Image: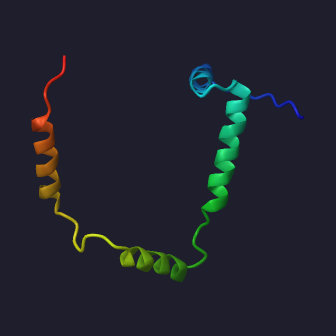
Amino acid sequence: MTLVQIEIPDTDRERFVRQARREGMTLSAWLRAAGRARLENRSRARPFASEEDAMAFFRACDDLDGPEVEPDWNEHLRVINESRASKVAVK
C-alpha cells in the first residue's frame, strides 16, 4: 500500500473527519471511498460525441411519460404559498 500525504485547509479536514465519524469510518477510509465514488461517477458520465448525440438524448427525454405541459410559474407559486401558509409555526 502506498502512503499519500495531502494538504487540505483545516476547515475541510474538520468537516471530513466529522462526516467520516458519522459513517463509522476513519478519515483515510472515508477519503478513499470518496475518491472511488468520484471515479465511478465520472466513468459513467460521458460527454456527447456530437450534436446529433445530444439531440437524440433530448428526443428520448421528450418521449418519457409525464405531463404534457408543465404548470406555469404562477401555478407553482400558488402551490408553494399554500404549503407555506398551512405550516404551523414551531418555537
Task: Give the side of residue 29 with respect to residue 67, left or right.
Answer: right
Q: Position of residue 22 (x, y in %)?
A: 56, 24
Q: Residue at x 62, y 19 (%)?
A: 10
User: How many discs mark residues in the rendered view?
Assistant: 0
Q: Is residue 50 placed above or below 9 in the rendered structure?
A: below
Closer to the camera, 26 or 73?
26
> From this viewpoint, is residue 4 visible?
yes
Image quarter in which the C terminus is found: top left
Task: Give the side of residue 68 with respect to residue 85, left or right.
Answer: right
Q: Is residue 10 placed above or below 48 in the rendered structure?
A: above
> From this viewpoint, is residue 7 visible?
no
Image quarter in which the N terminus is found: top right
**Colour mapping:** rainbow
Q: Position of residue 50 (x, y in %)?
A: 57, 79
Q: Position of residue 59 (x, y in %)?
A: 42, 80
Closer to the camera, 68 or 38?
68
Q: Residue at x 12, y 56 (%)?
A: 74
Q: Residue at x 12, y 43 (%)?
A: 81
Q: Position of residue 18 (x, y in %)?
A: 57, 21
Closer to the camera, 57 or 6?
57
Q: Is residue 28 placed above or below 37 in the rendered structure?
A: above
* Farthest residue, direction right: 1
Residue 20, quarter of picture:
top right
Residue 86, quarter of picture:
top left
* Farthest residue, direction top: 91
